[in-house]
Amino acid sequence: MVADSAPVVVIGAGPAGLAAAHELVTRGLRPLVLEKSSQVGGISRTEVHDGYRFDIGGHRFFTKVPEVQRLWEGMLGDDFVRVARLSRIYYRRRFFNYPISLWNTLSNLGLWESGMILLSFLRWQALPYKEEENFEQWVTNRFGRRLYRTFFQGYTEKVWGIPCTQIRADWAAQRIQGLSLTQAILNAIVGTESAKSLISEFQYPRLGPGMMWERFAQTIARNGGEVWLNSEVLHLERAGQQVTQVVVRRGTEIQTVAASHVLSSMPLPELIADLSPTPPTEVARASRALRHRSFLMVGLRVARTPLFPDNWVYIQEPEVQAGRIQNFGNWSPLLVPVEGNSSLGIEYFCNEGDALWNADDADLVRLARHELAQIGLADESEVLAGPVIRQPKAYPVYDPEYRANLNLVRGFLAGLENLQTIGRNGMHRYNNMDHSMLTGILAARNVLGEHNDLWAVNTEDTYHEQVPDHAAREHRGLF
């Protein structure tokens, strides 16, 4: 339970941290939220440059968790609007449906290549990998080797920066839609209802996702909680099995805050490094081995619209470094202040400290403008420069060693009685917003005496934007 003399300290003002703090204030507590950046939202924030609003990473608001849905709608009301969902693969200057659609793929690739894909698929249906330990094996068993190499290998390795054989199969099971080529073929030929499709629309804040988290922060403050921005955690002091206080750099000042409980969404390597006394050597080593992938986004403006109807397109072209392109006007027209203009976010996946991450902003803008023209989506002469936005530690990496390292870190943290980790980075799990929020809500309830297992959230091997089987055929004819 909660001591009266010290607040519950929540580290991180992203979806998980804000959901936790909101749950606490609704139960009469006054949490303190510590956020090291200048705005709330984490990777789900909205940045504004010259009136243009940029959604960092692209965030569809869709959930199968009723409690989270009620929270979203209660926060924004009429400012929470419905948006048509469309995101496709761009390859050889053609748009391919995603998930893979049989007839669309066949018509775009041509008879010869399509025939080779089907033969490859049949070969791997007859003689699949007996074990699915990595991403390559998981996808090949469902689509065949040739389609894997065409649509999955290049893009996935661009995103993660490591070979697909080094990405665990459980990441594929969690993130790729519950679809196989068998289902696509059967549905296309005989109209079976066994195929799953994606949602045809989602909800979205009119002014971008940051609008949601700003409203959360306002509600928390109005009900007695506090949200400190520009407040970086330096140390978590512990005595025995309890975290007793948190040392924070707030602006230019160092402050020490007593804590009855700590709910942390900071990356696990940073959390372990900040604990004092320091954890055992093997725990510290395991935490440092947990890897993250970062990305940067180059904002570009084009003085015409529409360019393409998608919310974003996946760039499969191997000769360019860009991985995905967002079209912000297709999320909400209010993200683009100048009528008749298109606002794009060209996304590059990288590691902190590598050549892309350290490149000069002007060089990155030139690269993005050139690649946009190279793949044929706009002429370089009509493209105007925008901001470069860097996002560290965006995606936890599921490499071959991550599970053993994570289990070691989890085992140590489980011994700290008043510390819980929440959210994507706090659990080193590739959660969506709704599941990150749910971990925060359940952790807050644990503070009040419940016994919720946060690690049981989002354990099912299903994609979270699927519609039920009986409704699949109604959505855009994707299958």
Image: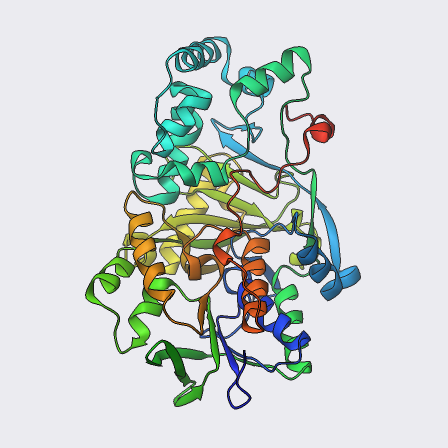
Q: Position of residue 426 (x, y in %)?
A: 43, 62
Q: Answer with left or right where residue 363 lies relative to residue 333.
A: left
Q: Quadrant of residue 184?
A: top right
* Rendered residue at 61%/67% (across/down): 213
> Please, is residue 316 above or below residue 237 in the view?
above
Q: Position of residue 338 (x, y in %)?
A: 67, 57
Residue furthest right as drawn: 78
Q: Quadrant of residue 47?
A: bottom right
Q: Nearer the viewer, residue 193 or 211?
A: 193
> Please, is residue 196 above or below residue 263 in the view?
above
| Way the structure is coloured | rainbow
Q: Position of residue 173 (x, y in %)?
A: 47, 36
* Rendered residue at 74%/49% (across/down): 82
Q: Answer with left or right where residue 73 lies relative to residue 367.
A: right
Q: Quadrant of residue 117?
A: top left
* Rendered residue at 50%/58% (across/down): 454
* Number of marks in picture: 0
Q: Answer with left or right where residue 270 lies relative to residue 227.
A: left
Q: From the image, which quarter does the N terminus lie in?
A: bottom right
Residue 375 seen in the current view? yes
Q: From the image, which quarter does the C terminus lie in?
A: top right
Q: Nearer the viewer, residue 179 or 67?
A: 67
